Image: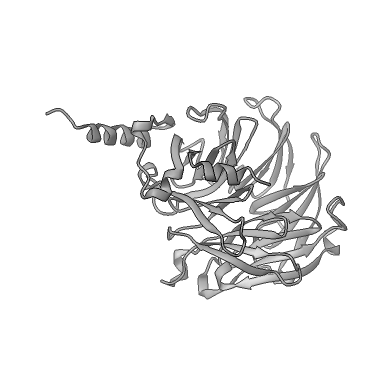
Amino acid sequence: MKPSRSHLRSILLAAAILAPGATPLAAEERPAAHGAVQAAFRIEAVLRDEMRLAGAHDVEVRNGYAYIAGKGGSLAIVDVRQPDAPRFVWSLHDPVGYEDAETVLPLGKHLLVGTRDLMLFDIAEPSLPQRRVHLRNREQIDFINGVVRVGNFILGANKAGFIVVTEWDGGDVLQFRGSRPTAHDGVVSPHDLDVTGEWLVVADGNGFGRNDKPGRVAVYRFRESDTSPPWPPERWTLEGKAEDRLLAGCNRVRTHGSLAIAACSISPAAGKADRRGSTQLIDLTHPAAPRICGSIPFPDTRGANGLTVSGRVAFVCGGRTVQAIGFANREKPEVLGSIDLTKALPGGEADLHDADYRDGHLYVTAQTSNALIILKIEDPAILDAASRP
């Protein structure tokens, strides 16, 4: 009996999901989006590898290359100059030496990698990266989940309760310059951070909803002005905090002028049927009194984990769902589009983790599927909003 066209499409998709390596999907083979609003995204490619993308956690894309750190002890550089045909150019898998690799930050011809340590690589030749610096200080440098560059300084969020400060000379030298213990500021577990003007904005997941604890977004005065270098950490002052049940599981934060966008994920261990992940908008107009000004619930029970912002759009991911949220009106954010990637992800519910947007494409990590998903944005309204300052 000749198989139907729909059956053939199912066979092709199943093969794409199970086969390791790059899997570009032709238009007729791509899983259909569910509902009109979900037509905003199209799967361009799925790149899977249980070793090279083990626990794929963070992704950053620069100049046609994707840099991916995985909690399974992986680090990979992927050529994405043709988004429909990504290919590995270099990778390593070392669960001991790169334990809990959680974040990457491209720095021109260098790459900062956060594991339980901090490392600096020379990536002038992407296929032959060379490690130049390895900073190890288990008391203060540990579980680096997010980083931000401030001139020649790089600040990292250590989930064990520190903001780590390093100084980079623009070349092969990276030096530890101290840390801010955050517990005495009431910031229990810094997961991410970003900068706006003289303010450092820190996300505190605080147990991801366990015991009904609130999450926090803290605002520090950490330098004189938006052109000044950071003060030594002991001089920073905690200016204000937004602390709310809605911010529980605050895992990622990005700033846009006087606005902070936070992606919040609730752990299943929270045991609360009414708790779900969400995206929260925090008004920073008065840093001493930051306030939640807008909120978008996340449709997936295991999100939102990841967040990237371009223009007036926040791309949020978690579980098996990706959302595009417009925040031109901070008091009334709106969902511009979403996609359910269940058919493309064999890794279970707690899969998608982080994202980066470049030139009309969204690059999303899947930590339990050990994969990089590349989505093409097809909605002109989203593309327009993403290009606006």
- Is residue 39 toward the left or the right of residue 55 in the image? left
Q: Position of residue 50 (x, y in %)?
A: 45, 38
Residue 325 lies, with reference to residue 29, above or below; the image says below
**Residue at x-position 65% and y-position 64%:** 282
| Residue 73 seen in this snapshot | no
For the N terminus, the quadrant is top left
Q: Nearer the viewer, residue 232 or 248?
A: 248
In the visual, does 67 lie left or right of 166? left
Residue at 36 percent of width and 50 percent of height: 35
Question: In this figure, which colouring scheme has been used for the structure?
Answer: one colour
Q: Position of residue 76 (x, y in %)?
A: 57, 35
Q: Is residue 91 above or below residue 185?
A: above
Left or right side of 355 for 217: right
The picture places residue 39, in percent across and down from the top left corner, at 42, 44
Count of numbered tags: 0
Location of residue 55 in the rendering, given as x and y in whole percent from the top left corner: 50, 45
In front: 188, or 33? Answer: 33
Viewer-proximal residue among 93 and 36: 36
- Residue 265 is left or right of residue 60, and the answer is left
The quadrant holding residue 246 is: bottom right
- Identify the image quadrant of residue 168: top right
Q: Is residue 261 visible?
A: yes
Q: Residue at x 60, y 65 (%)?
A: 331
- The answer to whether residue 165 is above or below residue 180 is above
